[in-house]
């Protein structure tokens, strides 16, 4: 089974080598695609150096400029479909998502789920080292999204996800509208509306120890207004 982990990066030089080596140390035979938005800190150069060590399993898409999380994942999804990967994962570079949990997401997908969400907000899941205001915004956004869309997902903005190939093949990727937190909601919402089975598994989400968060007010606003627009999506 061909499994690809997609990691979008922008200025992640402190984390990128460690996360790559950790994923490749797992027994699940994962491949990695790093989508780097022209990081000025040299992230891309580090990845290129590691490609000499992992030529068959480590791939890099370089883009010019900071184009947004959603467009990075869309580019990665299209690449994965062209290369015929069967299971495609989203994961952050900063270890807020624990690479060891990839196996748990994959197991749930292999057991019959079409989309598996690493969830902070179901029994057994939790957040570590976040300030109260980030927790309030995140949990409030999850409740807000569920009330408006009726989508049965407790952590709709989660960015640790496994998609089966058939889901990404069915979603019109060129029509996906949003780029921030709303992108994560939109992908799950489109999968749900198409009738795919979504399962949540609990994870412990720990705030990054190195590097800088990409959160902004515009990302939050996009999610707040975006969920209303999603109700018209088919």
Image: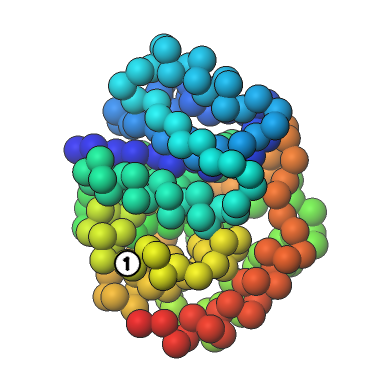
Query: Which one is nearer the viewer's eye here, 161 or 127?
Result: 161
Task: Write the residue at 52% across / 23% down.
Answer: 47
> From what the image shows, is residue 61 above or below residue 183?
above
Describe the colour scheme in one phrase. rainbow
* Residue at image coords 70%, 72%: 221
How crowded pointer 1 is (Cα within 10 Å; few <14, some 14-19, many 20+) is rated as some
Residue 170 lies left or right of residue 147; in this view the side is left
Task: Tell me residue 55's x, y (percent).
Answer: 35, 18
Residue 20 placement, left or right of 102? right
Q: In which quadrant of the rendered view does residue 94 lie? A: top right
Q: Residue at x 40, y 26 (%)?
A: 58
Q: Quadrant of residue 201?
A: bottom left
Q: Position of residue 212 (x, y in %)?
A: 75, 40
Task: Determine if residue 101 is in view.
Answer: no
Q: Is residue 113 above or below residue 93?
A: below
Task: Name the residue carrying label 1.
Answer: 171
Q: Quadrant of the C terminus?
A: bottom left
**In this rendering, is residue 12 above or below 184?**
above
Residue 95 seen in the current view? yes
Q: Position of residue 228 (x, y in %)?
A: 56, 85
Q: Is residue 159 above or below residue 1?
A: below
Q: Secondary structure at mark 1?
A: loop
Residue at left 65%, top 25%?
42
């Amino acid at each position: 089974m061909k499994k690809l982990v997609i990691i979008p990066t922008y200025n992640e030089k402190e984390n990128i080598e460690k996360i790559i080596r950790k994923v490749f140390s797992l027994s699940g035979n994962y491949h990695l695609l790093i989508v780097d938005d022209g990081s000025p800190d040299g992230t891309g150069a580090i990845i290129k150096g590691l490609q000499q060590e992992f030529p068959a399993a480590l791939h890099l898409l370089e883009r010019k400029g900071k184009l947004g999380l959603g467009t990075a994942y869309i580019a990665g999804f299209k690449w994965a479909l062209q290369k015929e990967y069967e299971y495609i994962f989203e994961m952050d570079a900063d270890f807020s998502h624990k690479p060891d949990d990839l196996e748990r997401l994959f197991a749930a997908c292999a057991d019959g789920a079409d989309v598996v969400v690493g969830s902070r907000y179901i029994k057994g899941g939790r957040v570590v080292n976040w300030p109260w205001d980030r927790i309030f915004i995140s949990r409030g956004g999850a409740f807000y999204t569920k009330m408006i869309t009726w989508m049965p997902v407790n952590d709709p903005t989660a960015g640790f996800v496994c998609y089966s190939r058939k889901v990404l093949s069915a979603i019109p990727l060129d029509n996906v509208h949003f780029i921030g937190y709303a992108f994560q909601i939109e992908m799950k919402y489109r999968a749900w509306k198409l009738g795919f089975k979504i399962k949540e598994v609990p994870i412990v989400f720990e705030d990054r120890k190195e590097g800088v968060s990409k959160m902004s007010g515009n990302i939050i606003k996009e999610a707040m207004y975006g969920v209303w627009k999603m109700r018209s999506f088919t």
